[in-house]
Image (tube, grey):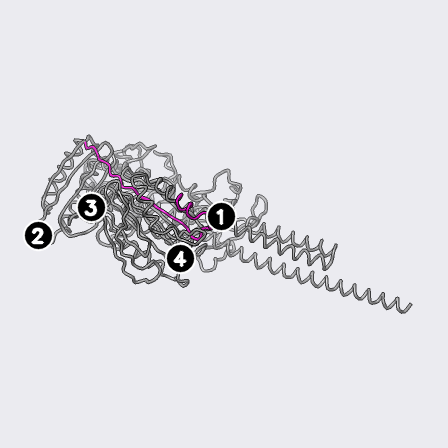
């Protein structure tokens, strides 16, 4: 009996210890799960704040960009508008011309101070409107429609302060029936007295699409409010949370409601519950910098931010309870290992998915469509060795020049793909404003070297091909030497230079070459020459040149297809060890049929400018161009010629300037040639017209104006002469 009792006690004691062990493990696991839950939740909260702040900044930049464009257009015409003060009878035609040249604005007008013209009525307000792409001019809407503008903010504020002013948005019931805002500035006459207020109307119909495109969460939405909290833009009526925007506006305007500031930002956050379904939500909001001082707000819902986390926690708890109740410690261990296996598989699938997304993004960065220009034919191919790689190529056309590049980042996989993505973005961004490949390479190298602790480097080749002449400027940064294929293939003369990311202060050398008609320019990465077969023998440059010779005269696409087929035949079943990229450019200049050709020569004397204007007007009339386009052509050519007169020749030195006008069925071109010092006006950075006259740097407005008036401008230094070509499509 004692033995049975003893064994029973031991069994009970063992069960007790086992129960306590299971309970202790269960409590420990639950504590770990709770800690992980709250830690993960805090990370998601931080991510939500970061993403909301980023969205607010992004939306503010988009809105501010359109407002700055509006300010820039009006400010660029200030001098023209001031001249109109002396000639009130020409105001209507001038306003119509400006509105016609800027079709994305709603209207432009002048509101004169009462009684400014003694022989006019007390109020004088000429205005031009863009109504459904039709320009309508009202010589005096104050007189015609009884419009008393002296009581409106767009007029009273600039008069009172002497500064520009953005009005609160309003509906223009009188004319356009659109929701608009007006940017107005005071205009001073020759006596430096405010004579009138110039205003430009901007339709706000684009705001809703801009603010509510690509939200951080499906149910989140954006609002735009005035400085005092009045609604400017709201989510679409079919938005699932449309009913909550009134609550968000009320909370933003209620200063007594508790709010906090996102860490390291000035963005305010207010937490609230949706009246529709009681869901917890947050509204993030912040004022835009400068004027107008509007507010951008983003509303997000907790169920989207933390919903999956709560579901995951509930499922884990349920599995734990079932496991401990049914099988105890052993089943618990089984589920723990099984969960680890599931997490590992999930991580593997997630990594594979992320790599697939990265591969798609990297592929989408490459240019897929051929360029729209008759002088060239382009083909390209990129065969990646892994999901993502370090090879890249790019090309685009700006100012009648083909900008192209090819590169290869050191290493393989994700690190090299990230470095190359940055390099590609820098090429696009810098190439959009800079035309010299040597300076483009210099600026990219400076950026790549910043914070390059991993010592990654990039071999890169940049070329800029002038499409009318075939003159090519290029710069190489340690990349494989390209080939020029005519009847036979030959290597381009290149200075190797150091790759990008090696030395920040390295001075890159630029070079020039002349492409002849039907030449093919072949660029490639070392994945072509170093492709290996099963015996580890490389394809080599000799085979590349041999294939180029064998395919001379074929199209760029066929050339690449044949070379790639030969590489695959050579490699056989061997695994690809590196990315293989090729870019082929065929130069095919076309012969244009001119319907008009005129030429005039002058010396660098400003007195000849009027002669040039008359000549341009004669050319435009021969082509039956409208008065508006004729005025634009005269102004653009005048600005370019004056620029040459002022800067091409040293002071006191007489020099010749030749201006040639040629017209085809598609375009009118003015080619301005001089023998002065080398200077490239197209390399001048764009003028920041949002700055005041005191803050803006001196110069640059002339070429800025020419860019606005012409479709393309192209500069080349040919045989010791500056050649500037202005093109206007007909």
Mark pair 3, 1: CA separation: 63 Å
Mark pair 4, 2: CA separation: 53 Å
Q: Which image quarter is the N terminus in?
A: bottom right
**Which residue corresponds to mark 2?**
653
**Which residue corresponds to mark 3?**
189
**Which residue corresponds to mark 1?**
356
Comes first in the chain, label 4 or label 2: 4
What span is colored magenta in the figure? 565-594
Mark pair 1, 2: CA separation: 64 Å
Name, please, the residue furthest toward the right. 1
Q: Vertical placement of 345 versus 4: above or below?
A: above
Comes first in the chain, label 1 or label 4: 1
* Residue 39 on image: x %, y %: 57, 59
Residue 564 belongs to the span the image colors magenta: no
* Residue 612 on image: x %, y %: 13, 40
**Which is in the foreground here, disc 1 or disc 4?**
4
Q: Are marks 2 and 3 in contact (CB under 8 Å)?
A: no
**Which residue corresponds to mark 4?**
410
């Amino acid at each position: 009996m004692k033995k049975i009792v003893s064994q029973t006690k031991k069994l009970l004691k063992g069960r007790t210890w086992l129960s306590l062990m299971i309970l202790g493990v269960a409590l420990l696991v639950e504590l770990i799960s709770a800690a992980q839950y709250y830690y993960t939740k805090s990370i998601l909260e931080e991510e939500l704040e970061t993403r909301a702040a980023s969205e607010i900044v992004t939306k503010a930049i988009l809105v501010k960009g359109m407002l700055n464009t509006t300010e820039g257009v009006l400010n660029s015409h200030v001098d023209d508008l001031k001249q109109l003060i002396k000639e009130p009878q020409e105001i209507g035609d001038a306003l119509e011309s400006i509105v016609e040249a800027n079709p994305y604005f709603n209207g432009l007008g002048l509101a004169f101070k009462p009684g400014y013209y003694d022989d006019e009525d007390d109020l004088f307000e000429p205005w031009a409107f863009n109504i459904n792409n039709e320009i309508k001019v009202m010589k005096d809407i104050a007189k015609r429609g009884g419009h008393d503008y002296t009581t409106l903010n767009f007029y009273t504020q600039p008069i009172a302060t002497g500064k520009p002013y953005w009005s609160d948005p309003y509906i223009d019931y009188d004319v356009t029936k659109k929701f608009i805002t007006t940017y107005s500035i005071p205009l001073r006459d020759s006596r430096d007295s405010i004579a009138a207020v110039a205003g430009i109307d901007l339709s706000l119909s684009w705001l809703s699409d801009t603010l509510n495109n690509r939200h951080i969460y499906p149910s989140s939405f954006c609002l735009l409010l005035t400085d005092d909290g009045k609604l400017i833009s709201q989510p679409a009526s079919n938005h699932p949370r449309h009913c909550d925007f009134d609550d968000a506006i009320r909370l933003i305007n209620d200063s007594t409601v508790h709010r906090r500031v996102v860490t390291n930002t000035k963005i305010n956050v207010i937490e609230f519950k949706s009246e529709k379904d009681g869901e917890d939500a947050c509204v993030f909001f912040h004022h835009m910098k400068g004027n107008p001082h509007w507010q951008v707000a983003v509303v997000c819902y907790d169920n989207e931010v933390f919903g999956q986390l709560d579901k995951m926690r509930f499922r884990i708890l349920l599995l734990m309870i079932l496991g401990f109740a049914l099988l105890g410690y052993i089943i618990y261990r089984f589920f723990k290992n099984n969960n680890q296996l599931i997490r590992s598989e999930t991580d593997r699938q997630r990594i594979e998915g992320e790599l697939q997304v990265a591969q798609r993004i990297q592929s989408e960065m490459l240019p897929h469509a051929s360029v729209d220009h008759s002088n060239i034919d382009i083909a390209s191919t990129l065969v990646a060795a892994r999901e993502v790689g370090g090879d890249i190529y790019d090309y685009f056309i700006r100012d009648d020049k083909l900008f192209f590049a090819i590169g290869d980042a050191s290493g393989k996989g994700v690190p090299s793909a990230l470095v190359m993505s940055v390099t590609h973005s820098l090429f696009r961004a810098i190439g959009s404003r800079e035309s010299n490949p040597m300076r483009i390479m210099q600026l990219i190298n400076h950026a790549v070297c910043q914070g390059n602790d991993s010592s990654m480097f990039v071999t890169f080749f940049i070329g800029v091909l002038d499409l009318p002449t075939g003159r090519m400027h290029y710069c190489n940064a340690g990349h494989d030497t390209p080939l020029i294929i005519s009847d036979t293939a030959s290597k381009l003369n290149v200075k190797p230079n150091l790759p990008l990311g090696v030395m920040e202060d390295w001075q890159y050398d630029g070079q020039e070459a002349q492409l002849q008609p039907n030449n093919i320019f072949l660029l490639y990465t070392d994945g072509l020459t170093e492709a290996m077969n099963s015996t580890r023998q490389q394809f080599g440059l000799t085979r590349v040149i041999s294939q180029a010779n064998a395919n001379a005269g074929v199209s760029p696409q066929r050339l690449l297809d044949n070379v790639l087929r030969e590489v695959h035949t050579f490699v056989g079943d061997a695994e690809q060890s590196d990315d293989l990229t090729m870019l082929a450019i065929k130069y095919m200049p076309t012969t244009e049929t001119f319907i008009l050709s005129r030429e005039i020569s002058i010396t660098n004397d400003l007195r000849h400018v009027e002669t040039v204007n008359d000549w341009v007007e004669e050319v435009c009339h021969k082509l039956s161009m409208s008065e508006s386009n004729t005025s634009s052509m005269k102004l653009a050519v005048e600005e370019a010629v004056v620029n040459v007169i002022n800067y091409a020749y040293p002071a006191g030195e007489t020099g010749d300037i030749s201006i040639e006008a040629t017209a085809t069925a598609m375009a009118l071109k003015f080619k301005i040639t001089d023998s002065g010092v080398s200077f490239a006006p197209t390399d001048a950075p764009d003028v920041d017209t949002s700055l005041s006259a005191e803050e803006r740097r001196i110069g640059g407005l002339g070429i800025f104006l020419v860019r606005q008036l012409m479709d393309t401008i192209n500069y080349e230094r040919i045989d010791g002469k500056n050649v500037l070509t202005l093109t206007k499509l007909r």
